[in-house]
Image: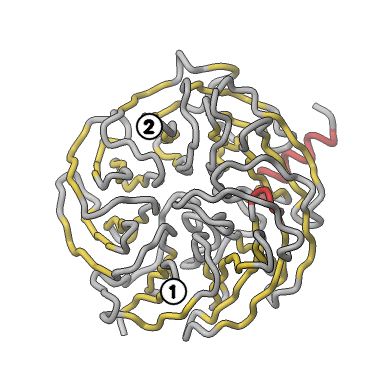
Amino acid sequence: MTPARLCVLLLLTATSAVAAPAPRDEWPEFRGPTGQGHTTATGLPLEWSAEKNVVWKQPVPGTGWSSPVVGHGRIYLTTALPGPGSTPSLRTLCLDAGDGRVLWNTEVFTAAESREQTIHQKNSQASPTPILAGERLYVHFGHHGTACLDLAGQILWRNQDLGYASVHGNGGSPALVGDRLIFSADGSASPFVVALAARTGEVVWKVARTADAKQKFSFATPLLITVDGRPQLISPGSGAVSALDPADGRELWRVRYGGGYSVVPRPVFAHGLLFLATGYNRADLLALRPDGAGDVTDTHLAWRTTKGAPLTPSVVVVGDELFAVNDAGIASCWDARTGTLHWQERLEGNYSASPIAAEGKIYFLSEDGVGTVVRAARTFEKIATNKLGERTLASYAASDGALFIRTATQLYRIGLK
């Protein structure tokens, strides 16, 4: 190993999954401070409605399904406003977490700069979730471009050099690994994974996907894990999931899953196993051992199941159990180590948002704005069903004893008054 490569590996390992650890009880990226749906926030409400336990609600201009991130007493999210033609103005908003006031609204890419795009009815031109790290906010708009802002809303850098043939719009969020911002660009052709320098936005490395999938497009968010002291970037795509070396993008191992495409859920890592779903047209839920090298499809599968596997929502592990809800509303609980099914129950509605775990409970959120709270236990126990009556595809954020829920038109702070 060269001295330069050793320095890079030491930097990536020392900085772990983010440039600076998120303060306790904040929500800095998609799926929270661990990237896996857990929050340390306490006193979250169990019951709410469009009137009950609403601390405030604030209209959000434009359209977008990026989930909110929370830190420093502020909330950040992205949105797309109609432009003068067929392309949108892509913007970043900052709101006061205490009262919901919009503090600033920065145009990141103008309508003239954004690119043509066909949008799926369950997607938007502002779906990837920002990352809050220290005094910087990273925002990503898929094939439109990526940018970094300071917390006053001033643009520090922009990168629009990585356009690709997107399908159905944007989706996957980036991951911040040390001094690198890493995301997948899985379009209709020539998909790739790329790392940008977090300080400048310049390309550090770019690697092509090589899985033999007929449908190339996917929307997954990568996850950084550490196995035997070595960092691995877990990057699901169409046809296969790969573990990449975050120093240079080199593939460490892969597991093939055939024709799976339009992969959305973010992986989860617990008990030495990786849990991920394989995409359309029929998802399998896989539990993989991430300690191999090369193609480990035939050797590193711990267990798999099809019934109850989600196409869109990510899963969450609490203790020894793995919890999920599939798109049709079937919630499930398995033994995380063995795949033994403990229960499956139908919840109200269809689901795209990823559940979160807090204080021994699982919070689900349907596309119709129905929030269901269940006990994180081997026996099914529904605690509450809560109806906002508004469409939502974004996932919860949780901080300071409150839930933050983005609907089609509003941002809610749900908490005990």
Let me know if residue 190 appears in the view: yes
Label annotation for residue 410: 1
In the image, what residue occupies the spot 31% across and 41% down? Answer: 322
Q: Residues within 10 Å of mark 2 (few under 14, many from 20)?
A: many
Amino acid type indicated by mark 2: Ala
Mark 2, secondary structure of its residue:
loop
* Image quadrant in which the C terminus is located: bottom left
Q: CA distance from mark 2 to mark 1?
A: 32 Å
Please state if 246 lies on the left or on the right of 239 as rendered: right
Residue closer to the observer: 274 or 371 = 371
As drawn, 23 above or below 340: below
Please state if 218 lies on the left or on the right of 381 as rendered: right
* Image quadrant in which the N terminus is located: top right
x, y percent for residue 270:
41, 39
Label 2 sits on residue: 283
Quadrant assignment, res 212: top right
x, y percent for residue 380:
15, 49
Amino acid type indicated by mark 1: Gln
Let me know if residue 272 appears in the view: no
Quadrant assignment, res 248: top right
Residue closer to the observer: 210 or 14 = 210
Q: Residues within 10 Å of mark 1 (few under 14, many from 20)?
A: some
x, y percent for residue 300:
45, 20
In the image, what residue occupies the spot 19% across and 64% down? Answer: 384
